[in-house]
Image (cartoon, rainbow, N blue to C red):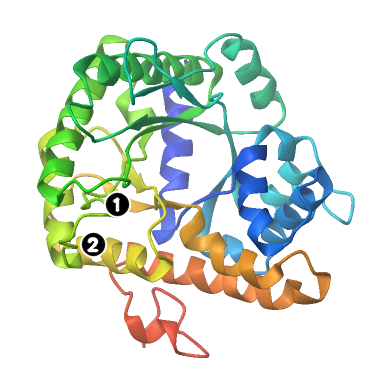
Amino acid sequence: MNLQKLEETARALLADGKGLLAMDESTGTANKRFAPLGVPQTEDARRAYRDLIVTTPELGQNISGAILYDETVRQKTNDGRPFVEAIIQAGIIPGIKVDAGAKEMAAHPGEKITEGLDGLRERLAEYAGLGLRFAKWRAVITIGDGIPSDGCIAANADALARYAALCQEAGLVPIVEPEVLMEGSHTLEQCAEVTERTLNIAFDVLVRRRVALEGMILKPNMILPGLDCPVQNPAEEVANATVSCFLRTVPAAVPGIAFLSGGQPSELAAERLNAMNVRFKGRMPWALTFSFSRAIQQPALEIWAGRDENIPAAQAALLHRAQCSRAARLGEYHPDMETSTDPATPGEQR
């Protein structure tokens, strides 16, 4: 393991107020998002959509890293460049999703375990050879009647740690993603309790598996009430609960935390991240940024809808959401950015 190389990659992913773009949807997930829009559920349509993303002008000014899917790594852009090459030329670090998805966990009704460890060492070596510099593994934790169980959390933490150790062995920075899902009627307080328990167990196992914390990035959920909870807390309460939880659970050696959006509306995800970076500026030992998928992609996907003539407008929407996300990372986001036709570049005076 080359710890210096890992630290350099992690720092580059967290530099200049930028964040990560997750464009690693599995074939099934991509097809599910295409279907309501009438987009053909084909490999070529998925390739065309991802071409739209990576060729968006100026995307690298706001995005430091892009998480790809195995299918995309083996495809080319419209002008014949491998996607990995096109991303690097855009000034973005390429990464890869390596888990095989969450499956029903035996003897644990309502809970899931993420699979994909078999053959992972060999796959990581191949990805490193293709120019990828980081990887991602997602575990899902569900809040419900009597769950999550300690057994489910522990099993997923062990898989995350084994994955992370293999990544670092291969020279790839692991993105560790233990996601407490938004689905359900649980309160913000219940989410905080489960997230704190999950992170405590996860970091205990990561340390025991000898994962170098300086060479990884955490990708967690925000502390949120369930989608069906009658009380939806304001951004300031979400910010307080989230950062307070992390200050109790995430070691200072971890260089950065990059939030998943988890299906939050784009504007709300930006508002909540902004509130954290404003309220806790100077009090956090790690960078607090984003690793959004739908919160950056969804408006562009809806505009594109599979039609080439919509690509310029879709790319403009994608860039706008990336700019808003970066502004939230810097604590400079304001709702007025959503209606402005010429929002200031984050980091500049407005």
Task: Return the x and y of residue 41 as percentages of the image width and height.
Answer: 76, 48
Q: Which residue is mark 1?
A: 288
Which quarter of the rendering shows the C terminus?
bottom left
**Residue lying at 80% horizontally and 69% vertically, measured from the top left:** 307
**Residue lying at 33% horizontally and 75% vertically, measured from the top left:** 333
**Residue lying at 72% horizontally and 40% vertically, measured from the top left:** 72
* Farthest residue, direction right: 80
Q: Amino acid at mark 1?
A: Leu
Q: Visible in this render: residue 146?
A: yes
Residue closer to the observer: 28 or 52: 28
Task: Return the x and y of residue 103 as percentages of the image width and height.
Answer: 47, 22
Q: Visible in this render: residue 68?
A: no
Kind of element beneath mark 1: strand
Q: Is residue 35 above or below residue 250?
A: below
Residue closer to the observer: 273 or 32: 32
Q: Is residue 242 toward the left or the right of residue 272 in the image?
A: left
Sequence-first tag of 2 and 1: 2
Quadrant in which residue 165 is drawn: top left
Neighbourhood count class around disc 2 (C-alpha, 10 Å): few under 14, some 14–19, many 20 upward: many
Instruction: Find out whether the residues at labels 2 and 1 contact each other: C-beta distance under 8 Å.
Output: yes
Q: Is residue 275 above or below residue 20?
A: below
Kind of element beneath mark 2: helix
Quadrant in which residue 10 is drawn: top left
Q: Amino acid at mark 2?
A: Asn
Q: Which residue is mark 2?
A: 277
Task: Return the x and y of residue 286 as percentages of the image width and height.
Answer: 25, 45
Q: Is residue 252 above or below residue 305?
A: above
